[in-house]
Amino acid sequence: ATVGATKLVPHVLELSFGVDRNVWALLDLSYAKGDRVVLRLPARIAPVPVAVFPLVNKDGIPERAEALWAAVRKRIAAFYDDSGSIGRRYARIDEIGTPFSVTVDHETLEGKGVTVRERDSQKQFRVSEGELADTIERLLSGEATFPA
């Protein structure tokens, strides 16, 4: 720009320090579409780190699952779903990036704990109801790894 006889060069530096680009990159790198659609968000940043499901909607299993969900969500953000088959529930939760799913089944009613499923490997193990929240917290923090 010229003002009178003096030439002025404006020094304007416009920087953007938003997180948009980083978040989009993370989502792009975490999204996997193959045999199944999975959002492989790191466990520490997953919006909902654990989901609780009843295996079937009868025999007192949904009531036990809801009670467990209520106990877990006092310490960890948790999601509850009892609609559709267990396979469809797993698929839905994998798509939104939830790293761990807990299934309440007939063995739970017999005092044999619940099944914990890991999203990426789809491996499962059983843990007692009383140890569930601690186990999930240790898995989320990286203090523990998923059993082989």
Image (tube, rainbow, N blue to C red):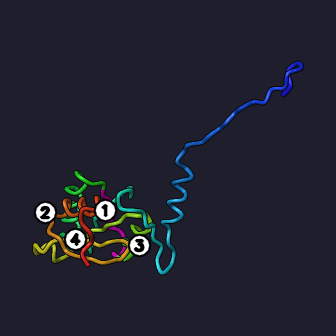
Q: Do the residues labelled 1 and 4 touch (CB within 8 Å)?
A: no
Determine whether the residue tagged by mark 3 lies in a helix, strand or loop: helix
Give the mark, 1 or 4, whose residue is nearer the N terminus: 1
Which badge, 3 or 1, comes first in the chain's sequence? 1
Q: Label 4 neighbourhood size at 10 Å, few (<14), some (14-19), many (20+)?
A: many
Whole-number angstrom distance, CA of label 4 to CA of label 3: 17 Å
- Kindly report the distance in space between the C-alpha atoms of the residues bearing marks 2 and 4: 13 Å
Q: How crowded is mark 1: few (under 14 residues within 10 Å), some or many (20 or more)?
A: many
Q: Quadrant of residue 77?
A: bottom left
- At 19% from the left and 71% from the top, the residue drawn is 114
Q: Do the residues labelled 1 and 2 touch (CB within 8 Å)?
A: no
Query: Label 1 amino acid?
Result: Val
Sooner in the amino-acid sequence: mark 4 or mark 3 = 3
Q: Which mark is residue 130?
A: 2
Front disc: 1 or 4: 1
On the picture, is 97 further left or further right than 103? Answer: right
Q: Where residue 91 is drawn, which disc sits there?
A: 3
Sequence order check, earlier mark of 1 and 2: 1
Residue matched to label 4:
104
Please state the extent of the stretch shown in magenta in the rendering: 78-86
Q: Which of marks 2 and 4 is in front?
A: 2
